[in-house]
Image: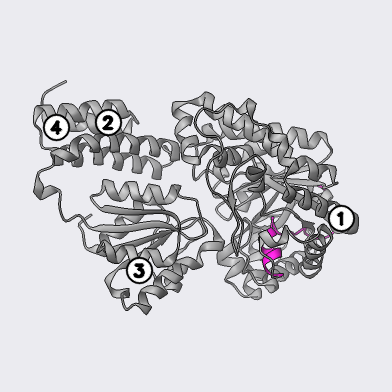
Amino acid sequence: MSNQPETLYRALSDAVVGMDEEKTRQLSEQAVQTGVDAYTAIEQGLVDGMNRAGQLFETEEYFIPELLLCSDAMYAGLDVLRPHLKRDHSVARPKVVIGVVEGDTHDIGKNLVKIMLEASGFETIDLGRDIPPKRFVEEAVKHEAQVIALSTLMTTTMDGMAEVIQLLRQAQLRERFKVIVGGGPISQAFADRIGADGYSSGAPGAVKLVKQLVGVAA
Amino acid sequence: MTSKEIIHKAIRLEPTPRLPVSLLSAGAWTLNRNGLTLEQALNVSPERFAEVVAQTNELAGCDMVWPGSGYHNLAIRGAGGRIKFRVKGTPDVQEPILRGDWAAASLNTRRVQDDPGVRLLANAARILVRQIGAHTLVGTSQWAPFTLGGLAFGVERLMRSIHKDKPAVHAALEFAASLCYDYLEPFIDAGVEMISLADPTASGDLISREQFNEFALPYIQRVATKIKARGVLVTVHICGNTTNRLDRISVAGADIMSVDYKVSLADARRILGGKAAFAGNLNPVAIMQKLTPEGVAEASRASIAAAGPGPGYILMPGCDIPPSVPLENVQAMVQTARGFAPGGAHPPQPTS
Protein backbone atom coordinates (compact mmCIF):
# COMPACT_ATOMS: atom_id res chain seq x y z
CA MET A 1 0.00 0.00 0.00
CA SER A 2 1.18 3.52 -0.77
CA ASN A 3 2.05 5.66 2.21
CA GLN A 4 -0.02 8.56 0.90
CA PRO A 5 -2.67 9.57 3.45
CA GLU A 6 -5.28 9.62 0.69
CA THR A 7 -4.64 5.97 0.00
CA LEU A 8 -5.15 5.19 3.67
CA TYR A 9 -8.37 7.20 3.82
CA ARG A 10 -9.70 5.31 0.81
CA ALA A 11 -8.73 2.00 2.39
CA LEU A 12 -10.55 3.00 5.58
CA SER A 13 -13.62 3.95 3.58
CA ASP A 14 -13.46 0.67 1.66
CA ALA A 15 -13.10 -1.33 4.88
CA VAL A 16 -16.21 0.33 6.34
CA VAL A 17 -18.30 -0.16 3.22
CA GLY A 18 -16.89 -3.69 3.00
CA MET A 19 -18.24 -4.44 6.52
CA ASP A 20 -14.73 -5.37 7.71
CA GLU A 21 -14.53 -4.37 11.37
CA GLU A 22 -11.10 -5.87 12.04
CA LYS A 23 -9.50 -4.29 8.99
CA THR A 24 -11.03 -0.93 9.84
CA ARG A 25 -9.53 -1.14 13.33
CA GLN A 26 -6.12 -2.11 11.96
CA LEU A 27 -6.13 0.69 9.38
CA SER A 28 -7.20 3.17 12.06
CA GLU A 29 -4.27 2.07 14.23
CA GLN A 30 -2.01 2.45 11.21
CA ALA A 31 -3.36 5.96 10.74
CA VAL A 32 -2.48 6.80 14.34
CA GLN A 33 1.00 5.28 14.04
CA THR A 34 1.82 7.11 10.82
CA GLY A 35 0.63 10.37 12.32
CA VAL A 36 -2.04 11.30 9.79
CA ASP A 37 -4.66 13.75 10.98
CA ALA A 38 -7.29 11.80 12.94
CA TYR A 39 -10.09 14.17 11.98
CA THR A 40 -9.38 13.78 8.27
CA ALA A 41 -9.07 10.00 8.65
CA ILE A 42 -12.52 9.98 10.26
CA GLU A 43 -14.08 12.34 7.73
CA GLN A 44 -12.53 11.02 4.53
CA GLY A 45 -12.22 7.43 5.67
CA LEU A 46 -14.80 6.19 8.16
CA VAL A 47 -17.56 8.70 7.46
CA ASP A 48 -17.04 8.46 3.72
CA GLY A 49 -17.43 4.68 3.99
CA MET A 50 -20.62 4.99 6.04
CA ASN A 51 -22.03 7.50 3.58
CA ARG A 52 -21.29 5.12 0.71
CA ALA A 53 -23.08 2.39 2.69
CA GLY A 54 -26.04 4.76 3.12
CA GLN A 55 -26.13 5.34 -0.63
CA LEU A 56 -26.08 1.58 -1.26
CA PHE A 57 -29.01 1.29 1.18
CA GLU A 58 -30.94 3.91 -0.74
CA THR A 59 -30.38 2.06 -4.02
CA GLU A 60 -31.37 -1.26 -2.39
CA GLU A 61 -27.98 -2.88 -2.80
CA TYR A 62 -27.46 -2.89 0.96
CA PHE A 63 -30.11 -3.73 3.55
CA ILE A 64 -30.25 -3.59 7.36
CA PRO A 65 -27.79 -6.47 7.97
CA GLU A 66 -25.14 -4.77 5.82
CA LEU A 67 -25.72 -1.30 7.30
CA LEU A 68 -25.34 -2.67 10.84
CA LEU A 69 -22.01 -4.32 10.00
CA CYS A 70 -20.75 -1.15 8.27
CA SER A 71 -21.65 0.82 11.37
CA ASP A 72 -19.84 -1.71 13.58
CA ALA A 73 -16.74 -1.17 11.44
CA MET A 74 -17.12 2.61 11.61
CA TYR A 75 -17.44 2.60 15.41
CA ALA A 76 -14.42 0.29 15.74
CA GLY A 77 -12.40 2.84 13.78
CA LEU A 78 -13.83 5.77 15.75
CA ASP A 79 -12.78 4.11 19.03
CA VAL A 80 -9.19 4.14 17.80
CA LEU A 81 -9.14 7.56 16.14
CA ARG A 82 -11.26 9.75 18.45
CA PRO A 83 -8.72 9.94 21.31
CA HIS A 84 -6.29 11.44 18.80
CA LEU A 85 -8.53 14.27 17.64
CA LYS A 86 -7.07 17.73 18.10
CA ARG A 87 -9.11 19.86 20.46
CA ASP A 88 -10.62 22.09 17.78
CA HIS A 89 -12.21 19.05 16.21
CA SER A 90 -13.56 17.60 19.41
CA VAL A 91 -15.89 20.36 20.55
CA ALA A 92 -19.14 21.99 19.53
CA ARG A 93 -20.84 19.18 17.69
CA PRO A 94 -24.55 19.91 17.40
CA LYS A 95 -26.52 17.67 19.77
CA VAL A 96 -29.53 15.54 18.94
CA VAL A 97 -31.61 13.81 21.61
CA ILE A 98 -33.03 10.69 19.98
CA GLY A 99 -35.30 7.87 21.10
CA VAL A 100 -38.28 5.61 20.44
CA VAL A 101 -41.51 6.88 21.98
CA GLU A 102 -43.26 5.21 24.91
CA GLY A 103 -45.01 1.94 24.21
CA ASP A 104 -42.73 0.95 21.35
CA THR A 105 -39.58 -1.14 21.53
CA HIS A 106 -38.73 -1.27 17.81
CA ASP A 107 -35.43 0.57 17.56
CA ILE A 108 -33.67 -0.43 14.34
CA GLY A 109 -34.84 2.71 12.54
CA LYS A 110 -33.83 4.92 15.44
CA ASN A 111 -30.42 3.23 15.57
CA LEU A 112 -29.84 3.78 11.87
CA VAL A 113 -30.67 7.47 12.16
CA LYS A 114 -28.32 7.73 15.14
CA ILE A 115 -25.51 6.02 13.21
CA MET A 116 -25.92 8.28 10.21
CA LEU A 117 -26.13 11.41 12.39
CA GLU A 118 -22.95 10.46 14.23
CA ALA A 119 -21.27 9.72 10.92
CA SER A 120 -22.20 13.24 9.88
CA GLY A 121 -20.63 14.91 12.90
CA PHE A 122 -23.58 15.23 15.25
CA GLU A 123 -23.45 14.21 18.88
CA THR A 124 -26.41 12.03 19.76
CA ILE A 125 -27.90 11.43 23.17
CA ASP A 126 -29.59 8.08 22.68
CA LEU A 127 -32.38 7.62 25.20
CA GLY A 128 -33.20 4.15 23.89
CA ARG A 129 -36.71 2.87 23.43
CA ASP A 130 -40.06 3.03 25.24
CA ILE A 131 -39.32 6.59 26.38
CA PRO A 132 -42.05 8.69 28.10
CA PRO A 133 -42.68 12.10 26.45
CA LYS A 134 -41.50 14.02 29.52
CA ARG A 135 -38.07 12.45 29.37
CA PHE A 136 -37.38 13.72 25.85
CA VAL A 137 -37.97 17.25 27.10
CA GLU A 138 -35.89 16.82 30.27
CA GLU A 139 -32.95 15.32 28.43
CA ALA A 140 -33.03 17.90 25.66
CA VAL A 141 -32.89 20.68 28.25
CA LYS A 142 -30.21 18.95 30.30
CA HIS A 143 -27.92 18.36 27.32
CA GLU A 144 -28.71 21.69 25.63
CA ALA A 145 -29.63 19.81 22.47
CA GLN A 146 -30.70 21.53 19.29
CA VAL A 147 -32.82 18.72 17.93
CA ILE A 148 -35.21 16.13 19.38
CA ALA A 149 -35.65 13.11 17.11
CA LEU A 150 -38.66 10.85 17.77
CA SER A 151 -39.15 7.42 16.26
CA THR A 152 -41.93 4.84 16.27
CA LEU A 153 -42.87 1.86 14.15
CA MET A 154 -46.31 1.35 15.61
CA THR A 155 -49.53 3.12 14.82
CA THR A 156 -50.62 2.76 18.44
CA THR A 157 -47.75 4.88 19.78
CA MET A 158 -47.68 7.73 17.28
CA ASP A 159 -49.62 10.03 19.57
CA GLY A 160 -46.69 10.11 22.02
CA MET A 161 -44.90 12.28 19.46
CA ALA A 162 -47.59 14.94 19.62
CA GLU A 163 -47.37 14.83 23.39
CA VAL A 164 -43.67 15.72 23.33
CA ILE A 165 -44.49 18.80 21.27
CA GLN A 166 -47.34 19.75 23.62
CA LEU A 167 -45.03 19.44 26.63
CA LEU A 168 -42.49 21.69 24.92
CA ARG A 169 -45.21 24.26 24.25
CA GLN A 170 -46.49 24.11 27.82
CA ALA A 171 -43.00 24.66 29.14
CA GLN A 172 -42.50 27.50 26.62
CA LEU A 173 -39.57 25.61 25.18
CA ARG A 174 -40.98 24.89 21.73
CA GLU A 175 -38.79 27.45 20.00
CA ARG A 176 -35.63 26.16 21.60
CA PHE A 177 -35.63 22.77 19.88
CA LYS A 178 -36.26 21.44 16.41
CA VAL A 179 -38.41 18.32 16.58
CA ILE A 180 -38.21 15.67 13.86
CA VAL A 181 -40.27 12.49 13.54
CA GLY A 182 -39.90 9.25 11.63
CA GLY A 183 -40.83 5.57 11.46
CA GLY A 184 -43.05 3.20 9.50
CA PRO A 185 -46.49 4.77 9.95
CA ILE A 186 -45.27 8.39 10.08
CA SER A 187 -45.74 10.75 7.14
CA GLN A 188 -45.11 14.39 6.31
CA ALA A 189 -48.84 14.99 6.78
CA PHE A 190 -48.66 13.55 10.30
CA ALA A 191 -45.58 15.66 11.07
CA ASP A 192 -47.40 18.78 9.86
CA ARG A 193 -50.50 17.94 11.85
CA ILE A 194 -48.70 17.56 15.16
CA GLY A 195 -46.51 20.60 14.52
CA ALA A 196 -43.15 18.85 14.10
CA ASP A 197 -40.36 20.68 12.29
CA GLY A 198 -39.60 17.86 9.92
CA TYR A 199 -40.07 14.29 8.74
CA SER A 200 -37.92 11.91 6.79
CA SER A 201 -38.80 8.50 5.42
CA GLY A 202 -35.27 7.14 5.89
CA ALA A 203 -32.00 7.56 7.78
CA PRO A 204 -29.97 9.35 5.07
CA GLY A 205 -32.84 11.80 4.55
CA ALA A 206 -33.01 12.40 8.29
CA VAL A 207 -29.40 13.59 8.29
CA LYS A 208 -30.08 16.05 5.46
CA LEU A 209 -33.14 17.24 7.35
CA VAL A 210 -31.26 17.82 10.60
CA LYS A 211 -28.47 19.64 8.77
CA GLN A 212 -31.02 21.87 7.13
CA LEU A 213 -32.84 22.56 10.39
CA VAL A 214 -29.74 23.47 12.39
CA GLY A 215 -28.07 25.31 9.51
CA VAL A 216 -25.09 23.00 9.02
CA ALA A 217 -23.71 22.70 5.48
CA ALA A 218 -24.62 19.37 3.88
CA MET B 1 -73.72 -16.99 -0.46
CA THR B 2 -72.10 -16.58 2.96
CA SER B 3 -69.01 -14.53 3.78
CA LYS B 4 -67.11 -17.74 4.28
CA GLU B 5 -68.11 -19.18 0.93
CA ILE B 6 -67.07 -15.96 -0.77
CA ILE B 7 -63.61 -16.10 0.83
CA HIS B 8 -63.24 -19.77 -0.11
CA LYS B 9 -64.18 -18.98 -3.71
CA ALA B 10 -61.71 -16.10 -3.83
CA ILE B 11 -58.97 -18.41 -2.56
CA ARG B 12 -59.85 -20.96 -5.24
CA LEU B 13 -59.53 -18.04 -7.69
CA GLU B 14 -63.16 -18.44 -8.76
CA PRO B 15 -65.55 -15.55 -9.50
CA THR B 16 -67.49 -14.25 -6.49
CA PRO B 17 -70.93 -12.58 -6.44
CA ARG B 18 -69.38 -9.59 -4.68
CA LEU B 19 -65.90 -8.50 -3.67
CA PRO B 20 -64.58 -10.19 -0.50
CA VAL B 21 -63.51 -7.80 2.25
CA SER B 22 -61.92 -8.02 5.69
CA LEU B 23 -59.76 -6.35 8.25
CA LEU B 24 -56.38 -7.94 8.91
CA SER B 25 -55.85 -8.94 12.55
CA ALA B 26 -57.60 -5.99 14.27
CA GLY B 27 -57.32 -7.59 17.72
CA ALA B 28 -56.28 -4.38 19.48
CA TRP B 29 -58.87 -2.35 17.53
CA THR B 30 -61.65 -4.76 18.48
CA LEU B 31 -60.80 -4.98 22.18
CA ASN B 32 -59.73 -1.36 22.78
CA ARG B 33 -62.89 0.03 21.19
CA ASN B 34 -64.88 -2.14 23.61
CA GLY B 35 -63.06 -0.59 26.54
CA LEU B 36 -60.71 -3.51 27.12
CA THR B 37 -56.92 -3.47 27.15
CA LEU B 38 -55.34 -6.61 25.75
CA GLU B 39 -54.27 -7.53 29.29
CA GLN B 40 -57.80 -7.09 30.68
CA ALA B 41 -59.25 -9.14 27.85
CA LEU B 42 -57.18 -12.12 28.99
CA ASN B 43 -59.02 -11.98 32.31
CA VAL B 44 -62.54 -12.18 30.92
CA SER B 45 -64.19 -15.50 30.17
CA PRO B 46 -63.65 -17.04 26.74
CA GLU B 47 -67.41 -16.65 26.19
CA ARG B 48 -67.15 -12.89 26.81
CA PHE B 49 -64.03 -12.58 24.63
CA ALA B 50 -65.82 -14.38 21.78
CA GLU B 51 -68.91 -12.20 22.28
CA VAL B 52 -66.84 -9.01 21.93
CA VAL B 53 -65.31 -10.24 18.67
CA ALA B 54 -68.65 -11.44 17.28
CA GLN B 55 -70.55 -8.29 18.23
CA THR B 56 -67.86 -6.03 16.81
CA ASN B 57 -67.93 -7.91 13.54
CA GLU B 58 -71.70 -7.66 13.40
CA LEU B 59 -71.10 -3.92 13.22
CA ALA B 60 -68.08 -4.09 10.95
CA GLY B 61 -69.33 -6.80 8.57
CA CYS B 62 -66.01 -8.38 7.62
CA ASP B 63 -65.85 -11.74 5.88
CA MET B 64 -63.12 -12.95 8.29
CA VAL B 65 -62.44 -12.45 11.99
CA TRP B 66 -59.14 -12.99 13.77
CA PRO B 67 -59.57 -13.81 17.48
CA GLY B 68 -56.14 -13.86 19.11
CA SER B 69 -54.61 -11.31 16.74
CA GLY B 70 -52.62 -8.69 18.61
CA TYR B 71 -51.38 -11.34 21.04
CA HIS B 72 -48.50 -12.71 18.94
CA ASN B 73 -45.98 -11.95 21.66
CA LEU B 74 -47.75 -14.34 24.02
CA ALA B 75 -45.65 -16.93 22.19
CA ILE B 76 -42.54 -15.34 23.70
CA ARG B 77 -44.15 -15.27 27.15
CA GLY B 78 -45.23 -18.85 26.76
CA ALA B 79 -41.63 -19.83 25.95
CA GLY B 80 -40.38 -18.18 29.13
CA GLY B 81 -39.84 -14.56 28.06
CA ARG B 82 -41.11 -11.28 29.47
CA ILE B 83 -43.66 -9.13 27.69
CA LYS B 84 -45.23 -5.82 28.69
CA PHE B 85 -48.88 -5.03 28.17
CA ARG B 86 -49.98 -1.51 27.21
CA VAL B 87 -53.11 0.52 27.82
CA LYS B 88 -53.54 0.90 24.07
CA GLY B 89 -52.31 -1.45 21.42
CA THR B 90 -50.38 -4.68 21.65
CA PRO B 91 -47.90 -6.01 24.23
CA ASP B 92 -44.21 -5.93 23.38
CA VAL B 93 -41.24 -8.16 24.12
CA GLN B 94 -38.95 -6.85 26.86
CA GLU B 95 -35.80 -8.83 26.11
CA PRO B 96 -34.59 -11.67 23.90
CA ILE B 97 -35.05 -15.14 25.36
CA LEU B 98 -32.30 -16.76 23.30
CA ARG B 99 -29.37 -15.25 25.17
CA GLY B 100 -25.79 -16.22 25.75
CA ASP B 101 -24.94 -19.86 25.32
CA TRP B 102 -28.28 -21.32 24.46
CA ALA B 103 -29.18 -24.45 22.64
CA ALA B 104 -32.46 -24.23 20.79
CA ALA B 105 -32.99 -27.95 21.12
CA SER B 106 -33.07 -27.66 24.89
CA LEU B 107 -35.89 -25.13 24.83
CA ASN B 108 -39.27 -26.69 25.07
CA THR B 109 -41.56 -24.81 22.71
CA ARG B 110 -44.61 -26.91 23.48
CA ARG B 111 -44.95 -25.32 26.88
CA VAL B 112 -46.40 -22.29 25.08
CA GLN B 113 -49.63 -24.29 25.01
CA ASP B 114 -49.76 -24.12 28.81
CA ASP B 115 -49.80 -20.30 28.83
CA PRO B 116 -53.17 -19.28 30.32
CA GLY B 117 -53.53 -16.50 27.75
CA VAL B 118 -53.03 -18.86 24.85
CA ARG B 119 -55.56 -21.23 26.38
CA LEU B 120 -58.14 -18.48 26.78
CA LEU B 121 -57.69 -17.26 23.22
CA ALA B 122 -57.95 -20.77 21.79
CA ASN B 123 -61.10 -21.35 23.81
CA ALA B 124 -62.55 -18.07 22.56
CA ALA B 125 -61.71 -19.16 19.00
CA ARG B 126 -63.49 -22.47 19.59
CA ILE B 127 -66.62 -20.64 20.74
CA LEU B 128 -66.50 -18.29 17.76
CA VAL B 129 -66.13 -21.18 15.33
CA ARG B 130 -69.23 -22.75 16.88
CA GLN B 131 -71.24 -19.52 16.96
CA ILE B 132 -70.38 -17.75 13.70
CA GLY B 133 -68.12 -20.19 11.88
CA ALA B 134 -70.88 -21.47 9.65
CA HIS B 135 -71.03 -18.15 7.80
CA THR B 136 -67.88 -16.19 8.75
CA LEU B 137 -64.33 -17.44 8.36
CA VAL B 138 -62.64 -17.60 11.78
CA GLY B 139 -58.86 -17.36 11.77
CA THR B 140 -55.99 -16.38 14.01
CA SER B 141 -52.44 -15.20 13.57
CA GLN B 142 -48.86 -15.42 14.78
CA TRP B 143 -45.50 -13.99 13.73
CA ALA B 144 -43.81 -16.00 11.00
CA PRO B 145 -40.52 -17.59 12.10
CA PHE B 146 -38.12 -14.88 10.85
CA THR B 147 -39.93 -12.18 12.82
CA LEU B 148 -40.53 -14.41 15.84
CA GLY B 149 -36.88 -15.49 15.71
CA GLY B 150 -35.84 -11.83 15.69
CA LEU B 151 -37.88 -11.19 18.83
CA ALA B 152 -36.46 -14.29 20.53
CA PHE B 153 -32.84 -13.72 19.48
CA GLY B 154 -32.73 -9.91 19.29
CA VAL B 155 -33.51 -8.49 15.88
CA GLU B 156 -30.22 -6.63 15.37
CA ARG B 157 -28.28 -9.66 16.52
CA LEU B 158 -30.23 -11.75 14.03
CA MET B 159 -29.47 -9.25 11.27
CA ARG B 160 -25.74 -9.15 12.09
CA SER B 161 -25.57 -12.93 12.37
CA ILE B 162 -26.87 -13.27 8.80
CA HIS B 163 -23.31 -12.36 7.80
CA LYS B 164 -21.35 -13.44 10.83
CA ASP B 165 -22.93 -16.62 12.13
CA LYS B 166 -25.39 -18.33 9.82
CA PRO B 167 -25.68 -21.50 11.93
CA ALA B 168 -26.85 -19.38 14.88
CA VAL B 169 -29.47 -17.72 12.67
CA HIS B 170 -30.76 -21.05 11.48
CA ALA B 171 -30.81 -22.43 15.03
CA ALA B 172 -32.86 -19.41 16.16
CA LEU B 173 -35.21 -19.87 13.21
CA GLU B 174 -35.63 -23.58 13.91
CA PHE B 175 -36.64 -22.64 17.43
CA ALA B 176 -39.00 -19.94 16.13
CA ALA B 177 -40.63 -22.27 13.60
CA SER B 178 -41.34 -24.79 16.38
CA LEU B 179 -42.65 -22.10 18.69
CA CYS B 180 -44.82 -20.62 15.93
CA TYR B 181 -46.53 -23.91 15.17
CA ASP B 182 -46.81 -24.98 18.80
CA TYR B 183 -48.52 -21.67 19.58
CA LEU B 184 -50.96 -22.14 16.70
CA GLU B 185 -51.82 -25.77 17.29
CA PRO B 186 -54.43 -25.18 20.03
CA PHE B 187 -56.22 -22.76 17.68
CA ILE B 188 -56.17 -25.34 14.89
CA ASP B 189 -57.51 -27.91 17.35
CA ALA B 190 -60.23 -25.38 18.20
CA GLY B 191 -61.33 -25.36 14.56
CA VAL B 192 -59.97 -22.11 13.08
CA GLU B 193 -59.93 -22.29 9.30
CA MET B 194 -57.25 -19.71 8.50
CA ILE B 195 -53.86 -18.85 9.96
CA SER B 196 -52.20 -15.54 9.16
CA LEU B 197 -48.42 -15.59 9.39
CA ALA B 198 -47.12 -12.04 9.77
CA ASP B 199 -43.50 -11.41 8.87
CA PRO B 200 -42.74 -7.68 9.12
CA THR B 201 -39.02 -8.28 9.69
CA ALA B 202 -38.85 -10.09 6.33
CA SER B 203 -39.92 -6.90 4.54
CA GLY B 204 -38.09 -5.65 1.48
CA ASP B 205 -37.46 -2.52 3.53
CA LEU B 206 -35.20 -4.55 5.85
CA ILE B 207 -33.65 -7.56 4.09
CA SER B 208 -32.75 -8.40 0.51
CA ARG B 209 -34.61 -10.85 -1.69
CA GLU B 210 -31.70 -13.26 -1.38
CA GLN B 211 -31.77 -13.05 2.41
CA PHE B 212 -35.55 -13.52 2.31
CA ASN B 213 -35.11 -16.64 0.20
CA GLU B 214 -32.46 -18.05 2.51
CA PHE B 215 -33.77 -17.14 5.95
CA ALA B 216 -37.46 -16.24 5.84
CA LEU B 217 -39.10 -18.25 3.06
CA PRO B 218 -38.02 -21.79 4.04
CA TYR B 219 -39.36 -21.33 7.55
CA ILE B 220 -42.67 -19.81 6.38
CA GLN B 221 -42.91 -22.79 4.08
CA ARG B 222 -42.20 -25.25 6.88
CA VAL B 223 -44.90 -23.84 9.18
CA ALA B 224 -47.37 -23.38 6.30
CA THR B 225 -46.92 -27.01 5.27
CA LYS B 226 -47.77 -28.21 8.78
CA ILE B 227 -50.79 -25.90 8.96
CA LYS B 228 -52.08 -26.98 5.58
CA ALA B 229 -51.62 -30.63 6.50
CA ARG B 230 -54.33 -29.97 9.08
CA GLY B 231 -56.65 -28.65 6.35
CA VAL B 232 -56.26 -25.02 7.44
CA LEU B 233 -55.71 -22.11 5.03
CA VAL B 234 -52.69 -19.79 5.21
CA THR B 235 -52.42 -16.04 4.76
CA VAL B 236 -48.98 -14.48 4.64
CA HIS B 237 -48.67 -10.80 5.55
CA ILE B 238 -45.44 -8.87 5.16
CA CYS B 239 -45.29 -5.15 5.87
CA GLY B 240 -43.63 -2.58 3.62
CA ASN B 241 -42.47 -3.12 0.09
CA THR B 242 -42.53 -6.80 -0.87
CA THR B 243 -42.88 -6.45 -4.64
CA ASN B 244 -39.58 -8.18 -5.39
CA ARG B 245 -40.53 -11.26 -3.36
CA LEU B 246 -44.21 -11.70 -4.16
CA ASP B 247 -43.37 -14.39 -6.70
CA ARG B 248 -42.02 -16.52 -3.84
CA ILE B 249 -45.22 -16.39 -1.80
CA SER B 250 -47.14 -19.06 -3.68
CA VAL B 251 -44.02 -21.22 -3.35
CA ALA B 252 -44.33 -20.76 0.42
CA GLY B 253 -47.82 -22.22 0.32
CA ALA B 254 -49.84 -19.07 0.99
CA ASP B 255 -53.49 -19.10 -0.04
CA ILE B 256 -53.67 -15.32 0.44
CA MET B 257 -50.85 -12.80 0.27
CA SER B 258 -51.69 -9.66 2.18
CA VAL B 259 -49.75 -6.65 0.88
CA ASP B 260 -49.05 -3.28 2.45
CA TYR B 261 -49.72 0.10 0.88
CA LYS B 262 -46.20 0.23 -0.53
CA VAL B 263 -47.06 -2.55 -2.99
CA SER B 264 -49.03 -1.68 -6.11
CA LEU B 265 -52.09 -3.91 -6.43
CA ALA B 266 -51.55 -3.96 -10.18
CA ASP B 267 -48.11 -5.48 -9.53
CA ALA B 268 -49.64 -7.93 -7.06
CA ARG B 269 -52.17 -9.02 -9.70
CA ARG B 270 -49.47 -9.29 -12.36
CA ILE B 271 -47.18 -11.39 -10.14
CA LEU B 272 -49.69 -13.43 -8.12
CA GLY B 273 -52.64 -13.59 -10.52
CA GLY B 274 -53.68 -17.18 -11.12
CA LYS B 275 -51.36 -18.48 -8.37
CA ALA B 276 -52.67 -17.10 -5.07
CA ALA B 277 -55.32 -14.72 -3.85
CA PHE B 278 -54.08 -11.33 -2.70
CA ALA B 279 -55.37 -8.72 -0.29
CA GLY B 280 -54.65 -5.09 0.48
CA ASN B 281 -53.64 -2.32 0.47
CA LEU B 282 -55.48 0.57 2.19
CA ASN B 283 -53.06 2.63 4.26
CA PRO B 284 -53.99 1.90 7.90
CA VAL B 285 -53.17 5.42 9.13
CA ALA B 286 -53.39 7.83 6.20
CA ILE B 287 -56.65 6.28 4.92
CA MET B 288 -58.32 4.11 7.57
CA GLN B 289 -57.60 6.36 10.52
CA LYS B 290 -57.46 9.84 9.06
CA LEU B 291 -59.97 10.02 6.20
CA THR B 292 -63.73 10.44 6.40
CA PRO B 293 -65.97 7.45 5.52
CA GLU B 294 -66.41 9.04 2.06
CA GLY B 295 -62.63 9.25 1.72
CA VAL B 296 -62.25 5.61 2.74
CA ALA B 297 -64.89 4.59 0.19
CA GLU B 298 -63.11 6.55 -2.52
CA ALA B 299 -59.74 5.01 -1.59
CA SER B 300 -61.38 1.56 -1.55
CA ARG B 301 -62.68 2.11 -5.06
CA ALA B 302 -59.18 3.15 -6.13
CA SER B 303 -57.72 -0.05 -4.64
CA ILE B 304 -60.37 -2.15 -6.41
CA ALA B 305 -59.56 -0.42 -9.68
CA ALA B 306 -55.83 -0.93 -9.17
CA ALA B 307 -56.32 -4.64 -8.44
CA GLY B 308 -58.01 -4.94 -11.82
CA PRO B 309 -60.59 -7.41 -13.05
CA GLY B 310 -60.52 -11.08 -12.27
CA PRO B 311 -60.98 -13.25 -9.22
CA GLY B 312 -58.74 -13.64 -6.19
CA TYR B 313 -58.66 -10.08 -4.83
CA ILE B 314 -59.80 -9.27 -1.28
CA LEU B 315 -60.20 -5.65 -0.18
CA MET B 316 -58.25 -5.16 3.07
CA PRO B 317 -56.13 -2.58 4.86
CA GLY B 318 -52.41 -2.92 4.12
CA CYS B 319 -51.69 -3.92 7.73
CA ASP B 320 -53.31 -4.07 11.14
CA ILE B 321 -55.27 -0.90 11.93
CA PRO B 322 -54.68 1.45 14.90
CA PRO B 323 -57.18 1.18 17.79
CA SER B 324 -58.48 4.69 17.07
CA VAL B 325 -59.79 3.93 13.56
CA PRO B 326 -63.48 4.94 13.49
CA LEU B 327 -65.96 2.09 13.03
CA GLU B 328 -67.61 4.15 10.29
CA ASN B 329 -64.41 3.98 8.26
CA VAL B 330 -64.29 0.19 8.52
CA GLN B 331 -67.96 0.08 7.53
CA ALA B 332 -67.24 2.34 4.55
CA MET B 333 -64.56 -0.08 3.35
CA VAL B 334 -66.88 -3.07 3.81
CA GLN B 335 -69.87 -1.40 2.17
CA THR B 336 -67.79 -0.40 -0.84
CA ALA B 337 -66.73 -4.02 -1.35
CA ARG B 338 -70.23 -5.33 -0.75
CA GLY B 339 -71.59 -2.95 -3.36
CA PHE B 340 -69.09 -4.07 -5.92
CA ALA B 341 -69.67 -7.19 -7.95
CA PRO B 342 -66.55 -8.21 -9.85
CA GLY B 343 -67.69 -8.32 -13.43
CA GLY B 344 -70.88 -6.50 -12.42
CA ALA B 345 -72.24 -3.04 -13.03
CA HIS B 346 -70.52 -1.06 -10.30
CA PRO B 347 -67.54 1.10 -11.04
CA PRO B 348 -64.75 0.57 -11.79
CA GLN B 349 -65.84 -1.25 -14.92
CA PRO B 350 -63.86 -4.39 -15.60
CA THR B 351 -62.32 -4.18 -19.02
CA SER B 352 -61.97 -7.82 -19.98
How many residues crowd around disc 4 within 10 Å: few (fewer than 14), some, or many (20 or more)? some
State the image coordinates of residue B1 (x, y, percent, origin top left).
90, 58
Is the same chain shared between marks 4 and 1?
A: no
State the image coordinates of residue A45 (x, y, percent, origin top left).
21, 36
Q: Residue A14 bears which disc, if any? A: 2
Q: Residue at x 74, y 66 (%)?
A: B334
- Mark toward the viewer: 1 or 2: 1
Q: Is residue B287 visible?
A: yes
State the image coordinates of residue A22 (x, y, percent, origin top left).
30, 26
Q: Amino acid at mark 1?
A: Ile
Q: Residue at x 59, y 60 (%)?
A: B86
Asked if disc 3 and disc 1 are in contact, CB closer than 8 Å, the reply is no
Label 3: which residue? A197
Q: Residue B127 bears which disc, if any? A: 1
Magenta part, dominant SS: loop
Q: Earlier in the sequence, mark 3 or mark 2?
A: 2
Label 4: which residue? A6
State the SS at label 3: loop
Task: Please determine whether, in this image, residue B242 is positioned above or below residue B128.
Answer: above
| Mark-to-mark CA distance, 1 and 2 | 60 Å
| Mark-to-mark CA distance, 3 and 1 | 50 Å
How many residues crowd around disc 1 within 10 Å: few (fewer than 14), some, or many (20 or more)? many
| Mark-to-mark CA distance, 4 and 3 | 39 Å
State the SS at label 2: helix
Horizontal relation, residue A34 to residue B151: left or right: left
Q: Amino acid at mark 2?
A: Asp
Task: Please determine whether, in this image, residue B96 is positioned above or below residue B137.
Answer: above
State the SS at label 1: helix
| Mark-to-mark CA distance, 4 and 1 | 71 Å
Subunit bearing disc 4: A
Q: Amino acid at mark 3?
A: Asp
